[in-house]
Amino acid sequence: MKVFAFLPMIEHSVTEKIAEIVGSQNCSHEDVVLRFYSGDLWPRLGVYRLLGQEPLNLPDAVVWPSNEEEIAQVLKVCAHAGVPVIPFGGGSGVCGGTVPVEGGVILDLKRLNRILEVDEMSMTVHVQAGMLGQHLESFLNERGYTLGHFPSSIMCSTVGGWVSTRSAGQYSTKFGKIEDMVVGIDCVLPDGTRVYLDATEPHLGHPCYLRAMMGAEGTLGVITAVRLKINPVPSVRRLAAFRFMELGYGLEAMRSIMQYGLKPAVMRLYDPIDTLINGLAHERGGSEKWLRKIGLGTDSGRTEDLYRAFLRFPWLLQKLLGLLPLSSLLVIGFEGDANRTKWELETAMELIRRAQGRYIGTAPAEKWLRNRYSISFKLPKVFMLGAFAETLEVSALWRDIERVYTKARDKALKHVAVMAHFSHAYREGCAVYFSIAGYHEDKKVLLERYDRAVSALLEACLEEGGSLSHHHGIGMLKQKFMPKEIVGGERVFWALKGALDRAQIMNPGKVYPTTVQVRAQSETERGLSGFEAIASWYHKIGAMNTIVPEVPEEIKEILSLARATSKTILARKPKSKEEVREDCWYLDLSRLDQVLEMDPVSGIVTVQAGMTLHQLENYLYERGFTLGFVPRSRLFLTVGEVLANAAPREGSPLYGSILDNCIGLRVMLADGEEVVVRQAPRRATGPDIMHCFLGSGGKFGIITAACFRVYPLPQVREAVAFALDDPVVCVSSVRTLLARNVTPEWVLVVVRSP
C-alpha cells in the first residue's frame, strides 16, 4: 500500500488553539494515527481494504481530552472555525458511525474513564463516557453489583458509545436496552454549553433532549458521563436448551414465554443453518463432518477452497443443506435467587413443550455462554480468506417476525450466504440478527455484491414491517433507508440539529441523509388563504373557537388555514370561556375515536388520538386486555391529550408508563406534513423522534394516532396494607421490594399528618 504524508485541511491556528487546551502530547497529526482513526469496524471498510485502496476519509487531527471542560473549549474553537468534530469511543461500531466524512477533529474520549459515584441507596452508578464496558462491569462485580449490559463488544466498547447508539446487551430481555438503564446524561453541546439531562424531569413545552441525545451517534453533542441503574449480582443461573423441527414453533415458544410475563436473562433461537454451523464450529474437525454429511468431504487443506465456493454460490449451499433434516436450537437462561429461577425455568419448559420443543440438556446453552463474546473476534478471519462477513440486526412484531426473516433471507441469498438467530425478545416482538458472508475473486465485484446484499436484506425488512436496526445504530450503513424507517423523521432531526448544532459541526454525514425533501404545495393549498377557503371553514368553528375535524386529513387543511390567518392551534378543548383566546383555535379531536388495529398476537392496539383512555380500556376489557395501570384522573382524557402532557416515570412498577408502552406514533406537523413512527418492539434508529412529541405539550405537532403495548387482564387482583410508624422506614421497605425485583401493580404511601 502506498503511504503518503497527509496535510491537514484545517487552519494551523485552530490546531494550535486545540493543542493549548489539551496539551500538545494529547493532539496528533501523525499519518499512522490519522489512518487508525479513519473509520470503525464497519465491514464495508474491510472490503475496501481488500481492494488495496487508501482510506476513503482521514481526519485532520486526533484529540484526547481529559475532562469535560477541555471538551467544551475544543468544541467552542471548532464551532467558531466551522471544523467538523467526531466523538470517538472504542471504535467498535459496525455502521461507519465514526468515519470522518468531511475530515475534521476526532475527539477520542477514552481518557474520560473514571467512576464518578456509586449510589448504593438509589442503586445507580455515575460513570464517564470513555470507560470500557468490561472495566465498568468488573468494578461493579467487585461490589456485588452488575449493570446487566453485555454486548458482544463489551471488551472494546465504551459507555458513551453504548448510549449514543442505543445499544443492547445479550441480557436485554431481563435488564432492558441501555436506554432503559439511563437515569441521566452529562453532555456538552456543540457551542460548548455543559448540561445534565435528567430522565425523570418533565419536558413540557420542549422535546425530550435526553431521548434525542440517546441514539444521536454524536450528531447533536458529546456525551461525557452517564448515570445508570445497577442491579445485585444474581446468586443463581439456570440454563437449558431445546430443539424444534420447525422454526415457527420456536418463535411461538418465545412469544408465549414473553407474554406469560417471564423475563429470561437470555433467550436465543437459531435458524437451521446457524444451528448446524454453530453446533459444529467449536468441535475439532467440525467443518469436515458438516461437509461429509452432504457428500462433500475433503482433505483439510481444501476446506477453505470449498468455503469460498459456497460463499460465491450461496444458493448452492442453501440447496445442499436443504437435503438434510435440520432443526432449530433454542437456548434459554434465568438468573436471580434459587426459588424464583427454579419456578421460572419450570414454567418456561412447560410453555416450550407445548410449542413442540424437545429438551436436549444444558450443554448447548453452556457452550453459548462460554463463547458469547467470540463473534467480535471471528470477523477478521473471514477477511483473511479474501471474503467478507456482515451482521444486520432488525426488529419486528411477533405477527411479522417470521415473514421478515424469510423474505430478507431469500432476497439476500441471491448474493451471499445467510444465517440468523432471534433474540432480544419483548412482549410484542423480538430482533432477528442476520449474519451474511460473501466471496469473489474480483474485489470490485465483491464490493458490489456486499452493497447489493445489504440493500436487498434491509429493503425486504422494511417492506414486511420490520425496523432497520435494533441495537447497532445507523451510521452510514443504513442512512439511505431512514426516510422509509421514520416517514418525516428527517424533518424533525434536522430541526433538532439546527437548534443544537447551529455551526453544523457534529459528526456530519451520519444517521439521516443531508437533504430534506420538501413537499410542493398543490394549487388548492396555495389558495387556502383566499376568501372561499376561509369561509368554507369558518362555519365549522364552534363555541369557544373550537373546531371538530371529522378525519385526520382535515387537520392538514386547518393548519394551512391557521398559518394563513395567523392563528395559534391548540389540540385540546378550552376548559372554560375565560380561557379562550381570540388568536387561538382549539382542536376537538373527539370524533377521531376509532380503533385502527387490534393485534392480539403481538399484543398491541393502534387507536386515533381522540379516543379517551376510558373508551380504550372498555374496548380492551371486552377482548381480555388492558393498558395496564392508568391513574383515574386521566381516564376521561383523550389519548392525544395524555401523550402530549404525560411526565416521565409516571406509571407502574409492573406495567411501566404510558410513554414506555407507546411503540408507534402519527403526528401532524405545523406545515401539514406527517411524521410516522411505525410500531416496532425496539429500535436504534437515531434520536427517539417520538419523544419530541410525547410529553411536549403539543408544541411541535398534533398527535393523530398512537400504538400501545397491551397486557392480558390479570386473573387475580389483591391489595394489602401495612401500618408503619416511621415514613422513612416505609419508603425504605418499598425500595427493598423493588430492588429484589418484586413488581407490584401500584404502591401507595400515605403519610399521616402530625
Image: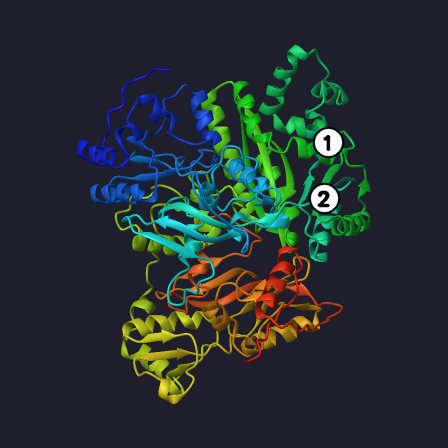
Q: What amino acid is labelled 1 in the image? A: Gly
The image position of residue 95, as x and y in percent, is 46, 37
Q: Quadrant of the C terminus?
A: bottom right
**Residue 732, located in which quarter of the rendered image?**
bottom right
> Is 149 displayed left or right of 349 in the figure?
left
Give residue 236's mark.
2
Q: Which mark is residue 491?
A: none
Question: How far is the residue under mark 1 from the one under mark 2?
Answer: 40 Å
Q: Is residue 498 above or below residue 530?
A: above
| Residue labelled with disc 1 | 322
Q: Pointer 1: residues within 10 angstroms few (<14), some, or many (20+)?
A: few
In the rendered structure, the answer to whether residue 714 lies left or right of residue 92 reads right
In the image, which is nearer the foreground, mark 1 or mark 2? Answer: 2
Evaluate if marks 1 and 2 touch, with contact meaning CB atoms under 8 Å apart. no
Amino acid under label 2?
Answer: Val
- The single residue placed furthest to the left in the displayed view is 13
Residue in view at x 42 percent, y 74 percent: 571
**Left or right: where does residue 365 sit relative to residue 132?**
right
Res. 145 in view: yes
**Quarter of the image containing the N terminus?**
top left
Q: Position of residue 360 (x, y in %)?
A: 81, 37
Q: Which sits earlier in the primary sequence, circle 1 or circle 2? A: 2
Q: Under tag 2, what secondary structure?
A: strand
Q: Nearer the viewer, residue 349 or 414?
A: 349
In front here: 736 or 97?
736
Visible in this render: residue 386? no
Image location of residue 706, percent across then percent down: 53, 65
Mark 2, residues whose alpha carbon is within 10 Å: few (<14), some, or many (≥20)? some
